[in-house]
């Protein structure tokens, strides 16, 4: 069962921690090549080091279209396409509903909604036939 994803390429946003890192670990365990994406350079580098030589990291922000484009272009350049895209990056600011201001709402929406849409848009040109997108 450890070779279920051999020869496949997975891209995981938010792959530097939490659920995204757990997903990336599973893909690596199944012998996929993995690109992880996240904002925090320290946790991103630690995750890439843990995941091993068939993984690389791209630092960026899911709210930034050019960062997402760079991620997908780099995955294509290194691995020749994308088989699995996991749009996992997300943020949440804890607080009272009445205290949420427009800037905080916009920041959250730019990552959690727009970021997901533009992650998929950036990946579409590189998705191989039969590829999967997981939102």
Image (cartoon, rainbow, N blue to C red):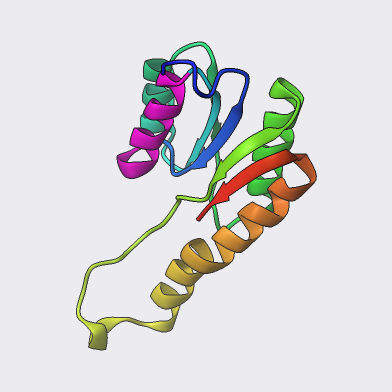
As drawn, the residue found furthest toward the front would be 1
Which of the two residues, 26 or 52, is positioned nearer the viewer here? 26
Q: Which residue is drawn at 36% across and 17% down?
A: 50
Q: Locate residue 31, reporting x and y percent.
A: 49, 17
If the image is split into quadrants, where does the N terminus sit?
top left
Q: Does 63 sit above or below residue 106?
A: above
Residues in magenta?
A: 17-30
Q: Residue at x 47, y 64 (%)?
A: 112
Left or right of 77 on screen, residue 40: left
Is residue 115 shown above or below 24?
below
Q: Which residue lies furthest to the left in this view?
A: 96
Which residue is nearer to you in this view: 116 or 82?
A: 82
Q: Residue 32: percent from the left, percent from the top?
A: 53, 22
* 59 lies left or right of 76: left
Q: Which residue is pictured at 39% across the width and 41% down the height?
A: 20
Number of numbered discs overlaid on the protein picture: 0
């Amino acid at each position: 069962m450890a070779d279920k994803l051999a020869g496949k390429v997975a891209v995981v946003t938010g792959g530097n921690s939490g659920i995204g890192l757990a997903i990336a670990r599973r893909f690596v365990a199944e012998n996929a090549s993995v690109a992880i994406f996240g904002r925090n350079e320290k946790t991103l580098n630690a995750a890439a080091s843990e995941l091993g030589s068939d993984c690389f990291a791209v630092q960026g922000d899911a709210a930034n279209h050019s960062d997402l484009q760079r991620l997908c272009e780099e995955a294509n350049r290194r691995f020749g396409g994308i088989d699995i895209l996991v749009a996992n990056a997300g943020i949440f600011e804890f607080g009272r509903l009445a205290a949420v201001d427009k800037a905080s709402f916009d920041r959250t929406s730019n990552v959690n909604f727009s970021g997901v849409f533009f992650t998929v848009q950036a990946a579409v040109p590189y998705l191989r036939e039969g590829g999967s997108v997981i939102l």
